[in-house]
Image (cartoon, grey):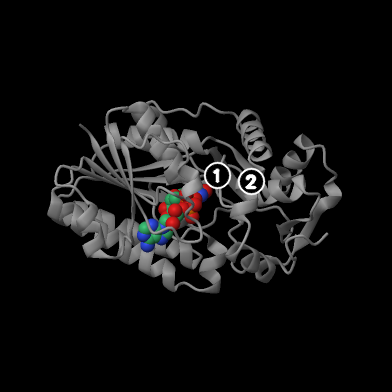
């Protein structure tokens, strides 16, 4: 029986990945290890097969907790657990260093001690910094590290630790680097669900700066399929950039959402730019396509429609996720009260 140790599996991408594992390997065992921070949400795991999925509340930076949950014959650790919001890392970086850097090292150490067969680190294109606006410039696996936010710096540090564990100790590791994910169950402070939730409520939509920053968008299920393919077939020690060749300006993304929802563009509100805001991300996915045969299944149009439909039919999920700590964060960040017009 295959045993997967998924960290951060109550978050947006980790929960989609856990579901995908259970569909792909119905007899496997998934240990889902998550600290349930503000971003972790057990609602995201509603309906998973409890016979094969075991949730463990725990912190990846706590060695004893990880060792207690990590079985001897674990086939793979897939590390999604992270502090993942750039704006929060600008407000305070401490938790980012603890979880993203120390937590990754703890997992690597535990993986070696338990003899885990493979370690997959879920990383981000943000470790490579910002591209020039020239549309011919793309991130490749060889692009230099130039992280610009504390979040990106912490994820870059984690990648270095994964590389070192492979090089020095021979741990079988692989790394995936992806751009902006979108899809069901993304915490509503992130750009796309924030837009969706606000637009559905006829609330203003904050857009940073001039709105011309470019991000490379991928449907979450496509990202998860790429992770699975890298896990199964990727070369030990390799890094794979994962992208759907779908780089778009923030303002155009916002307008697409409003158009599909038939809401006026007058809901857009330009707000003070994020400090150090990266201008452009665009991923060249040639390696993962040519070496592993991965291709995205969704187009931007089909993925966006699925995402919007999910949020329209899961209003309760949005309401619950938007309560509490999220409200305070929102008001502090954008100077707009949740509920204000
Ligand atoms: N969302 C994106 O667009 C994107 C793009 C590229 C890479 N990534 C990476 O993918 C991973 C998942 O991203 P996401 O958007 O699903 O994030 P998320 O914030 O939705 O989820 C993170 C999960 O990690 C858990 N967690 C946080 N600290 C923990 C700790 N110390 N111990 C155990 N669990 C902890 C949280 O409770 C949450 O469930 C992250 O590593 C992120 O850097 C995300």
In this picture, is 164 found above or below 248?
A: below
Residue drawn at the location 32% of the way across and 62% of the way down: 103
Camera-nearest residue between 334 and 51? 51
Residue drawn at the location 39% of the way across and 50% of the way down: 80
Q: Which residue is denoted by mark 1 in the rendering?
A: 185
Residue drawn at the location 60% of the way across and 64% of the way down: 324
In this rendering, would 67 be left or right of 209?
left
Q: Secondary structure at mark 1?
A: loop
In this rendering, would 205 be left or right of 227?
right
Q: Which residue is denoted by mark 2 in the rendering?
A: 316
Q: Where residue 256 sits in the image (x, y, percent)?
A: 73, 39
Q: Where residue 91 sits in the image (x, y, percent)?
A: 55, 73
Q: CA distance from mark 1 to mark 2?
A: 12 Å
Q: Where residue 151 sits in the image (x, y, percent)?
A: 47, 63
Residue drawn at the location 18% of the way across and 47% of the way down: 71
Q: Where residue 64 sits in the image (x, y, percent)?
A: 21, 64
Mark 2 crowd level (few <14, some 14–19, many ≥20, 10 Å Cα): few
Q: Quadrant of residue 233?
A: top left
Q: Quadrant of the N terminus?
A: top left
């Amino acid at each position: 029986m295959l045993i997967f140790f998924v960290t951060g599996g109550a978050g947006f991408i980790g929960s989609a990945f856990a579901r995908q594992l259970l569909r792909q390997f119905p007899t496997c065992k998934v240990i889902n290890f998550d600290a349930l921070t503000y971003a972790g949400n057990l609602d995201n795991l509603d309906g998973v097969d409890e016979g094969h999925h075991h949730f463990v509340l725990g912190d990846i930076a706590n060695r004893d907790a990880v060792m207690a949950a990590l079985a001897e014959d674990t086939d793979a650790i897939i590390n999604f657990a992270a502090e993942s919001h750039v704006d929060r890392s600008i407000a305070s970086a401490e938790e980012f260093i603890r979880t993203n850097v120390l937590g990754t090292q703890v997992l690597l150490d535990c993986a070696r001690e338990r003899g885990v067969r493979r370690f997959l680190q879920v990383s981000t294109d943000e470790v490579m910094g910002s591209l020039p606006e020239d549309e011919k410039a793309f991130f490749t696996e060889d692009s230099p590290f130039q992280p610009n936010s504390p979040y990106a710096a912490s994820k870059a540090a984690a990648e270095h630790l994964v590389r070192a564990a492979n090089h020095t100790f021979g741990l079988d590791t692989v790394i995936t680097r992806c751009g902006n994910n979108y899809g069901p169950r993304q915490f509503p402070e992130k750009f796309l669900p924030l837009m969706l939730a606000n637009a559905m409520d006829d609330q203003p939509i904050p857009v940073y700066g001039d709105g011309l920053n470019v991000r490379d968008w991928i449907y979450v299920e496509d990202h998860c399929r790429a992770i699975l393919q890298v896990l199964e077939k990727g070369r030990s020690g390799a890094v794979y950039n994962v992208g759907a060749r779908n780089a778009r300006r923030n303002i155009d993304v916002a307008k697409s959402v409003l158009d599909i929802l038939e809401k006026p563009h007058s809901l857009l509100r330009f707000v003070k730019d994020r400090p150090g805001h990266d201008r452009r991300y665009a991923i060249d996915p040639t390696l993962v396509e040519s070496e592993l045969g991965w291709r995205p299944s969704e187009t931007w149009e089909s993925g966006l429609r699925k995402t919007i439909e999910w949020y329209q039919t899961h209003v309760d999920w949005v309401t619950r996720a938007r309560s509490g700590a999220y409200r305070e964060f929102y008001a502090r960040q954008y100077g707009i009260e949740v509920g204000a017009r």
